[in-house]
Image: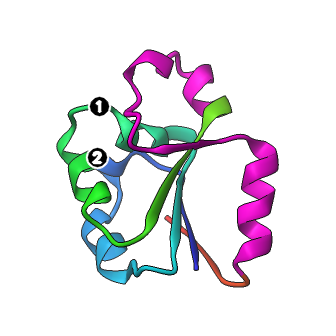
Amino acid sequence: MLHTLMHSPYYSDLDSLLQLLNEEDDLLLLQDGVLGALEGSQVLNRLLASPATLWVLTEDVTARGLSAQISTKVMPVDYTGFVTLTEKHQQQMTW
């Protein structure tokens, strides 16, 4: 399943999201969800501990001026990669 976190993780039901993630899942952080990829944050540590692959939309990171603050442990993806992720997963859930 593709999970997309579009809202700040600080204003989302992060606990429920983390409970639903499994090894086959991808989690894409976009819009204000990119705040979850900030280096050194507790949210990032929780997301990285999940079994899902963690992605961040580079255009949204750039738009927020956060390029230098995003963890290198998160996989960057552009809009083309976003489309590829949606093609990979028939089921999607937005948070």
Identity of the amino acid at label 2? Leu
Q: Which residue is mark 2?
A: 44
Q: Which residues are magenta?
A: 60-89
Give yes or no for residue 72 being in the magenta stretch. yes
Decide if residue 51 is on the left or right side of residue 92: left
Question: Dot 2, how many residues are within 10 Å of its Cα: few (below 14), some (14-19), or many (20+)?
Answer: many
Who's the residue at 22% across and 50% down the image? 45
Give the CA separation, mark 1 to mark 2.
Answer: 7 Å
Who's the residue at 34% across and 33% down the image? 38
Q: Residue furthest left?
A: 42
Q: How many marks?
A: 2
Q: Is residue 70 above or below residue 33?
A: above
Decide if residue 82 is on the left or right side of residue 45: right
Q: Are marks 1 and 2 in contact (CB under 8 Å)?
A: yes
- Measured from the top left, where is residue 16 in percent x and y? 30, 75
Quarter of the figure that contains the N terminus: bottom right
Looking at the rendered structure, the secondary structure element under dot 1 is loop
Give yes or no for residue 39 being in the magenta stretch. no
- Decide which of 42, 6 is in the foreground and name it: 42
Identity of the amino acid at label 1? Glu
Who's the residue at 57% across and 45% down the image? 30
Q: Is residue 75 above or below residue 61?
A: below
- Measured from the top left, where is residue 85 in percent x and y? 71, 64
